[in-house]
Image (cartoon, rainbow, N blue to C red):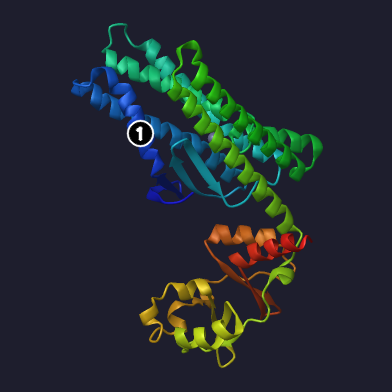
Amino acid sequence: MGSALNIGKLFGIQLRLHYSWFIIFVFFTILLVSPHWLSPSWWIIGIITCLLFFASVVAHELAHSLVGRANGIPIKSITLFIFGGVAQMTKEATRPGAEFKMAAAGPACSLAIGGLFFGLFWLFPPDIAEPIATMVYWLAYINVALAIFNLIPGFPLDGGRVLRSFLWQVTGDYQRSTRIATQVGRGVGYLFILGGILIAFLRPFGLDWFSGLWLVFIGWFLENAASASYRQAKWREALFKFTASQVMTSNCPVVPSSATVNQLVQGYIFTGGHHLFLVADEGKLEGILTLQNITSVSNQNRDVTQVKEIMTPINKLKAVRPDQDALSILEQMDENDMNQMPVVSEGRVIGLIARDNLLRFLRIRSVLGI
Ligand SMILES: [Zn+2]
């Protein structure tokens, strides 16, 4: 997901706000305040309610994240966007039990919060100020709705993950279970789109065209997310079959750390087509350099910038073994926010793996039909 604001850390997990989230914030506030435009108290309570809704979604994602972490699945960040929240994992579950617990934790948390607000609503005396009662009821309703929506069994929704964990438990086949769960996810997406179109045109049960359009929008998003998950599962499956020594670049030129960027571009990149470099002085490895490092230098500074200023120094690199599978290397890169890793055998660098190399490797293989 593209641009998002970092708004702080919770339990060591980065919390991010995607710009599309503001649309839903404004939409819900207007929805809540709409019949009482001129009343300041409704505005204040409307905004507080939307902030509590925000906290509810964060709690849902935190439930996934903390249960995931307790089961050995590291979580890097939580992003809130127009359709709710998403927790970014750097690794998939390795056991169906862990996947089930992690997936079920979110809806369970939302149900608990919904129940809490329903309880509050009943406990309130009947003559309670109307805006507060309305807001408490709305929060109860929206949290239960959030739980139910997420339990729809289409991957990558929580229900789809629960479905995959069941299939995985029964068949023992992770890949096949992922394929089935993502295909169900695509089917659910198409059903939403179809339902949305029918509602927009027939307008049953007093529903308006906007509800139909909204449903189409959600369906389109679900179908896209399920397709992306399917492709990602295929890539992971493919990467798992290769070792570091098969995907690494082994003919990296060695350049001195005092070389300028321009010398590198003229001497190696234009003529040799190289894009990965080992930086070494007198036989001692100092760091590595990729095309990405070079693009960070503006054109007019390329004559005066030296390789050592932009390279990734050796102390910031993590080495991998030549027999390590490519999937675990990609996961390691995600976990440590790295884009390249040296392959080390018996204390010697025998090659380099860059993130875009892995993807290029797979693309070339699929073009060749291997
Ligand atoms: Zn969830």
Q: Give 71 or 8, whichever is nearer the viewer.
A: 8
Q: Would residue 108 be found to the left or right of residue 229 on screen?
A: left
Q: Would residue 150 be found to the left or right of residue 4 on screen?
A: right
Check the image and name the residue furthest to the front: 201
Q: Residues within 10 Å of mark 1 (few under 14, many from 20)?
A: some
x and y, in percent, of residue 11 in the image: 45, 46
> Where ligand 1 lies, by quadrant?
top right
Amino acid type at circle 1 is Phe
* Residue at 44% from the left image edge and 41% from the top image edge: 80
Q: Which residue is mark 1?
A: 25
x and y, in percent, of residue 211 in the image: 46, 23
When asked about the image quadrant of residue 149, the answer is top right
Q: Would residue 225 be found to the left or right of residue 261 on screen?
A: right
Q: Would residue 127 be found to the left or right of residue 279 on screen?
A: left
When asked about the image quadrant of residue 355, the answer is bottom right
x and y, in percent, of residue 218 in the image: 52, 32
Helix or strand or loop: what does disc 1 sit on? helix
Does the beta carbon at disc 1 come under 8 Å from ligand 1?
no
Q: Give 268 or 162, whichever is nearer the viewer.
A: 268
* Residue at 29% from the left image edge and 21% from the top image edge: 34
Above or below 70: residue 293: below
The reply to whether residue 24 is in sight is yes
Q: Give 55 or 248, whichever is nearer the viewer.
A: 248
The reply to whether residue 112 is in sight is no
Above or below 204: residue 304: below
When asked about the image quadrant of residue 245, the answer is bottom right
* Residue at 52% from the left image edge and 61% from the top image edge: 337
Q: Give 353 or 179, whichever is nearer the viewer.
A: 179
x and y, in percent, of residue 232 in the image: 65, 50
